[in-house]
Amino acid sequence: MEKMKSNKLLRIALTKGRLEKDTVKLFEKLDFDCTELKEKGRKLILQIPNAGIEVVLAKAADVITYIEHGVCDIGVVGKDTIMEMGGQFFELVDLGFGRCRFALAGKKGSSFYEGYTTKTIATKYPNVARKFFEGKNMDIKIVKIEGSVELAPLLGLSNAIVDIVETGSTLKENGLEVYEDIAPISARMIVNTASLKMKQKEIESLISQIETVV
Ligand code: PRP
């Protein structure tokens, strides 16, 4: 009991949406009381009273910002956002859910690598795309798109896209196909560097509990 009292509160930033739901399922497997999280309404900061955890709901890119600034100790965020944004934090656990991949895709049947003209790539992930083509020593032009990137090659704006593929049905239903896989993606647990020192006991305990179920 005394030991419980000395535990420091962990503040966890959760990416809203699908990763949030999968994280709640994970916490429930650990018998964490997720009542507030499941009945949250429009509330953004929620408590898991029996685990000494406070949950903050945020957009993926903001999860990284909150961890880097040290206002949250732990973040649950996709590897896609980590690859795009980078940053100073520890990436400690692959949570196994939110699995998908980055891929280069475009119109079915067109041969992307043929010809010598500079190719245009539409993407929500310019840094990921740039790095991928740098690795191939290929000069490309990037057009940043905010959503439904699949439209760009269909409208003739780009030769291809760099985007997330999960089931592949968005590509298929729009006459597109994967040209090349770029990287696997899944949800990761990231930790603020100072928190790992200041709250080492609490963080290690949470990680070892999580590792029993992922
Ligand atoms: C993602 C991605 C693709 C789609 C792939 O978009 O950008 O469009 O999912 O999934 P699939 O392979 O299972 O069809 P998301 O649904 O996140 O919406 P967004 O375009 O608004 O970001």
Image (tube, rainbow, N blue to C red):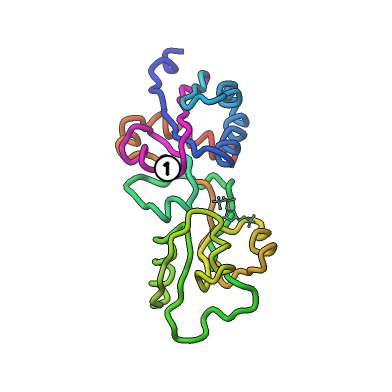
Q: Is residue 31 above or below residue 127?
A: above
Residue at 46 percent across and 13 percent down: it is 1
Q: Which residues are magenta?
A: 50-75
Q: Position of residue 199 (x, y in %)?
A: 35, 30
Q: Is 22 left, or right, of 116 in this rendering?
A: right
Q: Is residue 147 above or below residue 157?
A: above
Q: Position of residue 11 (x, y in %)?
A: 41, 29
Identify the image quadrant of residue 169: bottom right
Q: Nearer the viewer, residue 179 or 198?
A: 179
Q: Position of residue 57 (x, y in %)?
A: 48, 33
Image quadrant for the C terminus?
Answer: top right
Inspect the image, locate mark 1, and give the three-letter code of the amino acid beneath it.
Answer: Ile
Number of numbered discs overlaid on the protein picture: 1
Residue 124 in the magenta stretch? The answer is no
SS category of the residue bearing label 1: strand
Residue at 64 percent across and 78 percent down: it is 109
Q: Is mark 1 within 8 Å of ligand 1?
A: no
Q: Nearer the viewer, residue 173 or 45?
A: 173
Q: Is residue 104 above or below residue 97?
A: below
Mark 1, residue position: 190
Q: Nearer the viewer, residue 12 or 140?
A: 140
Residue at 38 percent across and 33 percent down: it is 73
